[in-house]
Image (tube, coloured by chain):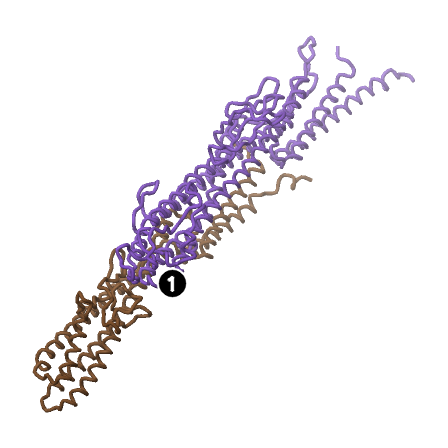
């Protein structure tokens, strides 16, 4: 037996459902440009029917779920590519800074200063008696020493600068981890009330995980209550409502540059465990700091300064000055473990230019016109010396430093281009699924509006039917 | 059919425009600097070439300057030897004149006085300088090789060598002590001794010796000087030949350097023009692809 108000109830439910769907359409339009937003869809379903003798009669519509349209596999791909992108971006950044330090090709880099230095010795070989030419040789020696000092200082500054960047990134990781932890708690609470998804909170959390994935490589697992654990190198930084923390420590094994360690989240004390970093922009920063700036440039520059100066000193010390003093070193090191940073022209030469040994030891006391030792020094330019990367001339060694940086810089910027293209494509793929299409939303809006209007009309019809029964029946003969 | 959302279109458009602008920026940098390599990563191989060629050009310039300096030194030597030759020629004339039997003893003494002046001049020529450096003293360039007071020769016979190419050296002084002044182990010059003998023989009217031995000695010395000048001339010639070769090399290396690091302006301008039209096309495509949405058509 159908109740009188059954039809009204169907109309009411339809009005409710269509207006909810309209609300969601509005929400989508409103968030069309929100970063990390996933479009939502109201899933409608027919409510439970009632049985009559002839079969089942529908009871109208109800909302089954408000669903996020998202493909988690694409999220995983984006996280994977994000870390590679972050890595190569850091590499490329550092390499382009190193290129600026090398200052090649130019007429003011170390190459040109060295060329001038050798030319100075050639001039001295022709005019060994001349005080003016001696002063030139001295000054050009100072320029060479200063060029080494300057580059060394710039590279050290660059390493300190990178350490600063690492610190910023670590703070970012810790801050993101805290936010993820807070969202975990909110999501678990929100979803505990039944089989529902906290769509907008999840969007925010996914965005944070994605941000973190470009800084450092992470693994993410979701548990059945809806909270996630994020692990870095096998250790959890967030696990549900628990939080760990990453800190920085000077590494004495690596020139006191910073390394990442796990610290106690409460008091920040060192737990004595290094963070294992696989990739991401932090890995790029650390690796470019140690490998590019450190090994590729600083180590080789130090070796170049040391080998070149030592070899020159041997020849110089074997010769005679204008005052027939022998055994003077032309270059000295403030600290022989840091040749490039501390190389200087021997200070005794500044006060007495006669000490510059242009004469060979075989020359007589008065043979001041013999500049053959200066020529031997000038010819050192063509001599292959024993550098760490094999035997080559000093010029060649510097050229190879510059070209290796060039090759790595080229590779890094190509990788950044590739990665960015890949990430763009993945973002497009995700946008194709999760992004808001205004055309679609407008179409839906019209669809839901029409349904709403129709439901309202249904209620009018029901109203008229009840009116007929209540007010017009049984008035015969009135 | 894949779902194309507004953001997909906008992102793609933005990326393509950025890429075009990036390419334009690179081309414009080449155009404004005139260089195709401005940092190592632009072309690591080209960089090595450019750096090496710059160094090579520096070496060539240095060697050219060495050659110029060497030539100046040799020219000074040549003119001093020329003067010395003139002096000896004059002594020879005086010797021939003095050996004339019709002259009186007083007249020969007068000739002898002139010869003594000329001997003094020989001493001056021996102490010729180039700049402030004595050219006939070997590597002992800061002190006069001939000490007039003691009549001793204090220079040495060491060579001064200039480098005129990688691994190529050339002596730019001559062995004046042995080849011209004939200095012996006791630091006495045979040349001056022979000239003094002429003066003595003139004083003593020893006509027989004047006309035979002395004249022969003078001729030998004049020959030695001519020979030394020939050597100097040959070296100047060699330096000039090397200098010509250096100039050719310099030109070649400059061209190579330009090829290695200079932008081909015609090519770059063509690229820029092409890129400009690509960019314009991209802009015009963008204006069409960012379409009005359905919103614009709903009442």
Residue located at (21% from left, 70% from top):
B233
Q: How many marks?
A: 1
- Identify the element where label 1 is drawn: helix
Indicate the quadrant containing the C terminus of chain A: top left, top right, bottom left or bottom right. Answer: top right
Does B43 sit left or right of A90 as displayed?
Answer: left
Say which chain tag 1 marks: A
Q: Residues within 10 Å of mark 1 (few under 14, many from 20)?
A: some
Q: Which residue reaches farthest top?
A: A53
Q: Colour of chain B?
A: brown
- Decide: is A219 above or below B117: above
Image coords of residue A337 (percent x, y)? 42, 40
Report the front residue among B55 and A465: B55
**On the rendered structure, is B299 left or right of A291?**
right
- Report which colour depicts chain A: purple
Q: Residue at x 41, y 51 (%)?
A: A346
Q: Is residue A37 visible?
A: yes
Which quarter of the rendering shows the N terminus of chain A?
A: top right
Q: Nearer the viewer, residue B22 or B155?
A: B155
Residue A74 in percent (x, y) is at 52, 28
Q: Nearer the viewer, residue A291 or A272?
A: A272
Residue at label 1?
A131
Vertical arrangement, residue B183 with respect to residue A45, above or below? below
Residue A438 appears at what percent x and percent y?
Answer: 62, 36
Q: Residue at x 22, y 67 (%)?
A: B174
Of all residues, the one furthest to the right in this rendering is A478
Residue B79 seen in the figure: no
- Image spot of residue B186 (x, y percent): 18, 66
């Amino acid at each position: 037996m159908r109740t009188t108000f059954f039809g009204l109830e169907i109309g009411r439910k339809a009005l409710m459902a269509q207006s909810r769907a309209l609300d969601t359409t509005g929400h989508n339009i409103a968030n069309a440009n929100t970063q990390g937003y996933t479009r939502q869809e109201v899933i409608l379903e027919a409510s439970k029917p009632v049985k009559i003798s002839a079969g089942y009669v529908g009871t109208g519509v109800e909302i089954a779920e408000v669903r996020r349209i998202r493909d988690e596999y694409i999220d995983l791909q984006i996280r994977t590519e994000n870390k590679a992108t972050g890595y190569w971006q850091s590499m490329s950044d550092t390499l382009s800074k190193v290129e600026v330090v090398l200052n090649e090709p130019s007429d003011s880099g170390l190459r040109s200063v060295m060329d001038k230095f050798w030319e100075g010795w050639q001039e001295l070989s022709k005019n060994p008696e001349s005080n003016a030419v001696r002063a030139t040789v001295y000054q050009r020696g100072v320029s060479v020493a200063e060029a080494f000092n300057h580059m060394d200082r710039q590279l050290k500054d660059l390493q300190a600068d990178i350490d600063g960047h690492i610190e910023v990134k670590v703070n970012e990781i810790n801050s993101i981890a805290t936010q993820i932890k807070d969202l975990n708690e909110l999501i678990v609470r929100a979803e505990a009330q039944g089989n529902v998804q906290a769509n907008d909170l999840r969007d925010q959390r996914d965005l944070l995980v994605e941000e973190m994935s470009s800084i450092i490589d992470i693994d993410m697992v979701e548990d059945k209550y809806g909270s996630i654990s994020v692990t870095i190198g096998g250790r959890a930084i967030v696990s549900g409502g628990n939080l760990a923390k990453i800190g920085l420590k000077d590494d004495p094994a690596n020139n006191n540059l910073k390394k990442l360690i796990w610290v106690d989240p409460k008091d920040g004390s060192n737990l004595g465990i290094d963070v294992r970093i696989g990739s991401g922009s932090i890995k790029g920063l650390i690796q470019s700091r140690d490998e590019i700036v450190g090994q590729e440039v600083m180590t080789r520059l130090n070796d170049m300064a040391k080998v070149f100066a030592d070899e020159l000193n041997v020849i110089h010390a074997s010769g005679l000055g204008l005052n027939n003093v022998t055994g003077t070193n032309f270059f000295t090191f403030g600290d022989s473990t840091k040749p490039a940073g501390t190389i200087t022209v021997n200070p005794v030469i500044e006060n007495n230019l006669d000490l510059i040994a242009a004469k060979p030891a075989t020359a007589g006391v008065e043979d001041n016109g013999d500049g053959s030792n200066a020529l031997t020094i000038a010819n050192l330019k063509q001599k292959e010396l024993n550098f760490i990367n094999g035997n080559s001339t000093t010029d060649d060694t510097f050229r190879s430093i510059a070209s290796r940086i060039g090759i790595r810089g080229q590779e890094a910027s190509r990788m950044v281009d590739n990665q960015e293209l890949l990430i763009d494509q993945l973002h497009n793929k995700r946008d194709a699924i999760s992004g808001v299409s205004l055309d679609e939303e407008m179409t839906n809006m019209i669809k839901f509006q029409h349904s709403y209007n129709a439901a309202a009309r249904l209620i009018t019809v029901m109203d008229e039917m009840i009116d007929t029964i209540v007010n017009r029946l049984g008035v015969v003969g009135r | 059919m894949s779902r194309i959302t507004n953001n997909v279109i906008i992102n793609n458009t933005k990326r393509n425009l950025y890429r075009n602008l990036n390419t334009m920026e690179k081309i414009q940098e080449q155009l404004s600097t005139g260089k195709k390599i401005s940092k190592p990563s632009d072309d690591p191989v080209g960089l090595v070439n450019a750096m090496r060629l710059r160094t090579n050009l520096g070496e060539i310039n240095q060697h050219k300057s060495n050659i110029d300096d060497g030539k100046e030194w040799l020219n000074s030597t040549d003119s001093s030897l020329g003067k010395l030759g003139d002096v000896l020629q004059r002594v020879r004339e005086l010797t021939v004149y003095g050996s004339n039997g019709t002259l009186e003893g007083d007249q020969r003494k007068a000739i002898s006085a002139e010869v003594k002046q000329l001997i003094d001049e020989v001493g001056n020529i021996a102490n010729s300088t180039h700049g402030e450096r004595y050219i006939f003293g070997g590597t002992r360039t800061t002190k006069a090789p001939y000490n007039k007071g003691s009549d001793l020769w204090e220079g040495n016979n060491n060579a001064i060598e200039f480098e005129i190419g990688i691994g190529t050296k050339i002596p730019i002084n001559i062995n004046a002590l042995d080849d011209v002044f004939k200095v012996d182990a006791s630091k006495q010059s045979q040349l001056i001794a022979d000239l003094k003998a002429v003066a003595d023989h003139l004083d003593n009217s020893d006509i027989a010796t004047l006309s035979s031995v002395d004249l022969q000695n003078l001729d030998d010395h004049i020959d030695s000087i001519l020979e030394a000048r020939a050597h100097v001339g040959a070296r100047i010639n060699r330096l000039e030949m090397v200098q010509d070769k250096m100039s050719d090399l310099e030109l070649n290396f400059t061209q190579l350097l330009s090829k290695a690091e200079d932008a081909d302006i015609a090519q770059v301008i063509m690229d820029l023009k092409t890129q400009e039209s690509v960019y314009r096309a991209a802009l015009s495509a963008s204006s069409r692809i960012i379409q009005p949405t359905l919103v614009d058509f709903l009442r």
